[in-house]
């Protein structure tokens, strides 16, 4: 359009911003036009050769309205002196009298106003929307966008869980197999598909920043870390506001909710789509009494439709603890501990029955009696059939799995099944028996300093039971040799712990990280290949948690597990029990907790009154029991 075709007073509209309404040309000269948009009280300057504006020209049949409120259908159109006039209800109206608020923002308005884009632009938008629709319908949506290695067992669990409308499951992979990644994959897919717009993640305080970083760096999901300071800041702008409604994905520590009943009440009334609880083995429960932490999670699980519980050690608190976690997920299915324990004693029989069904074998009366005990309705549905079709067998297997034991509520991957993990190598370091001039602690410090001096290039993780012991080891080592050490214990705040862990991970950072027991959960140090177990807990699942800091996906070398101990003491008892008896330093042992309970009294007695012959006999007895349990499992 030439400059002379544009006259002040003509009505124009912006294609880029149709919500501005009708504009009035104020001036036009030398390739530029100035337009006032009265409805938006905004004046714009445009270059004519690239301006996203056009002349408004209504046609017969279009509906218009005027400044005076007159509205109707256009009966006739004429142009006089470069201006358009419209006949409405028998009266001629100049275009200058058209209402400023006429907008072409809706597709229908733009179409009726003849505001049509070029065909190739429509094709581009149509193709983009088509691809967007395909992506949204893709079964891989939420799985392929993450910055992770695509590992088969993790993707299988994520796909299986997210295929359920409201998943409620226990993720119980062995330490180091990627439960956090699995949970994040599930959250990512549910969030993208609109099934988990609001998620609550309950964690040990020591894992808050790690989850935040994993979600952001790997999945581009922004989580908010909530503590009292953040809650008070949100309430400062609105005292009656519920701070937990401020974010879509919230990470909060279990201890914070346990110690803050008012905050828990706010969390409880907020609407959530998904609850994730990491390190769920800390939720203590018995038929007589449930811990405060358990009651908090139970209250949330009753209100939130989808629930993920994470633990690498589902049996850490014994069968009762395992039942209690399943009870959180499906209280109707898991409502009686005695029945659950009774079923647990028949897992092997039911597994063999399922194998026979899957192998197309004819079922015996004994088999049908087993099915009747586990589920009478399954027996009634299938027992009268002369033969079972392939579809019948598939359906029967699925129903047995769903109605017996943990069914499809629990997912657990093991290294034995997955293969490809590095070896574990226990290295025993028997030390000299202390005399009057030295103590067991001093003997261990002397060994530690010598060993570190001989292995100056190695990254080393040392774990012991208490913060006090960490500080004592740190001071004792520094008195003898100048080494770059870091500490990680409950006396440090969350940010300090993260800094210490990051400093240890830095190739130029600390050579040795001294950890109390809190360092044995959730932290990933697979870049190190040496683990020193200063002492040994009596719970084998805590031992597995410690080893799991190094023995996890991404570990590229043999894991050297160093066991300094004083011979002839309780230390030797526990070292030999775990090493030769249970074999936990060579590989994860699913029956370790059972063995610990079975031989606990003998271990205690032998620790109090050491005898070499008795220890050798006990270790042999434990090893035989492990092999027998392994054959049954």
Image (cartoon, helix red, strand yellow):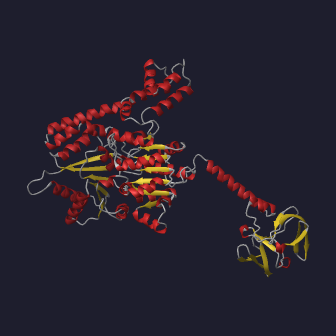
Q: Nearer the viewer, residue 454 or 628?
A: 628
Can residue 42 be seen from the camera position used here? yes
Position in image of residue 172 (x %, y %): 41, 43
Position in image of residue 275 (x %, y %): 46, 50
Q: Nearer the viewer, residue 339 or 453?
A: 339
If the image is split into quadrants, where does the N terminus sit?
A: bottom right
Can residue 185 be seen from the camera position used here? no
Residue at left 43%, top 21%? 369
Q: Nearer the viewer, residue 605 or 90?
A: 90
Q: Is residue 328 left or right of residue 98?
A: left
For the image, the number of numbered tags is 0
Position in image of residue 221 (x %, y %): 51, 58
Question: In this view, which residue lies farthest toward the left?
Answer: 436
Q: Quadrant of residue 349?
A: top left
Position in image of residue 4 (x %, y %): 85, 79
If the image is split into quadrants, where does the C terminus sit?
A: top left
Q: Is residue 399 left or right of residue 122?
A: left
Q: Is residue 556 left or right of residue 427?
A: right
Question: From the viewer's perspective, is residue 417 above or below residue 258?
Answer: above
Question: From the viewer's perspective, is residue 342 above or below residue 364?
Answer: below
């Amino acid at each position: 359009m030439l400059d002379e075709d544009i006259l002040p007073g003509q009505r124009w509209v912006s294609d880029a911003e149709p919500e501005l309404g009708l504009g009035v040309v104020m001036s036009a000269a030398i390739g530029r036009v100035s337009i006032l948009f009265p409805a938006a009280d905004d004046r714009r300057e445009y270059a004519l050769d690239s301006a996203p504006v056009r002349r408004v020209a209504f046609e017969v049949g279009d509906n218009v309205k005027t400044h005076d409120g007159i509205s109707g259908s256009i009966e006739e159109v004429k142009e006089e002196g470069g201006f358009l006039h419209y006949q409405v209800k028998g009266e001629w109206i100049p275009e200058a009298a058209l209402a400023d608020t006429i907008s072409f923002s809706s597709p229908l308005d733009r179409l009726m106003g003849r505001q049509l884009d070029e065909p190739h632009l429509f094709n581009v938008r149509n193709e983009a929307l088509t691809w967007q629709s395909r992506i949204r319908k893709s079964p891989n949506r939420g799985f392929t966008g993450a910055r992770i290695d695509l590992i088969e067992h993790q993707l299988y669990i994520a796909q299986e869980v997210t295929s359920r409308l409201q998943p409620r499951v226990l993720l119980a992979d062995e330490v180091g197999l990627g439960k956090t990644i699995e949970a994040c994959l599930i959250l990512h897919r549910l969030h993208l598909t609109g099934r988990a717009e609001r998620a609550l993640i309950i964690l040990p305080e020591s894992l808050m920043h790690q989850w935040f970083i994993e979600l952001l760096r790997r999945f581009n999901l922004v989580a908010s870390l909530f503590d009292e300071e953040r809650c008070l800041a949100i309430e400062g702008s609105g005292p009656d506001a519920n701070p937990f409604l401020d974010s879509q994905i919230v990470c909060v520590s279990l201890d914070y909710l346990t110690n803050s009943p008012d905050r828990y009440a706010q969390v409880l009334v907020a609407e959530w789509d998904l609850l994730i609880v990491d390190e769920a083995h800390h939720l203590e429960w018995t038929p007589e009494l449930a811990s405060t932490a358990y009651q908090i999670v139970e209250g949330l699980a009753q209100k939130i439709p989808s629930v993920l519980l994470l633990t690498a050690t589902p049996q850490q608190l014994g069968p009762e603890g395992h039942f209690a976690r399943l009870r959180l997920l499906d209280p109707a299915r898991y409502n009686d501990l005695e029945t659950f324990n009774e079923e647990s004693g028949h897992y092997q029989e039911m597994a063999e029955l399922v194998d026979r069904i899957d192998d197309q074998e004819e079922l015996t009366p004994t088999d049908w009696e087993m099915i009747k005990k586990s589920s009478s309705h399954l027996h009634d549905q299938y027992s009268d059939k002369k033969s079972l079709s392939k579809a019948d067998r598939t359906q029967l297997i699925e129903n047995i799995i769903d109605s017996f034991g943990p069914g499809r509520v629990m997912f657990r991957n093991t290294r034995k099944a997955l293969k490809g993990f590095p070896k574990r190598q226990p290295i025993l370091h028997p030390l000299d028996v202390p005399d009057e001039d030295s103590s067991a602690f001093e003997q261990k410090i002397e060994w530690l300093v010598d060993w570190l001096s001989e292995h100056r290039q190695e990254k080393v993780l040392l774990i012991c039971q208490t913060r006090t012991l960490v500080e004592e080891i740190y001071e004792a080592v520094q008195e003898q040799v100048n080494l770059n050490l870091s500490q990680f214990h409950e006396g440090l705040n969350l940010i300090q712990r993260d800094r210490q862990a990051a400093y240890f991970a830095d190739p130029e950072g600390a050579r040795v990280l001294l950890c109390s027991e809190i360092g044995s959960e959730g932290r990933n140090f697979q870049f190190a290949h040496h683990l020193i177990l200063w002492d040994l807990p009596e719970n084998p699942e805590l031992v597995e948690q410690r080893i799991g800091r190094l023995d996890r996906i991404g570990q590229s070398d043999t894991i050297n597990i160093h066991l300094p101990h004083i011979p002839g003491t309780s230390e030797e008892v526990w070292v030999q029990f775990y090493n030769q008896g249970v074999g936990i330093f060579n590989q994860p042992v699913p029956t370790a907790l059972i063995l610990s309970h079975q031989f606990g009294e003998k271990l205690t007695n032998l620790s109090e009154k050491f005898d070499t012959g008795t220890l050798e006999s006990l270790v042999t007895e434990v090893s035989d029991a492990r092999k027998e349990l392994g054959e049954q499992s």
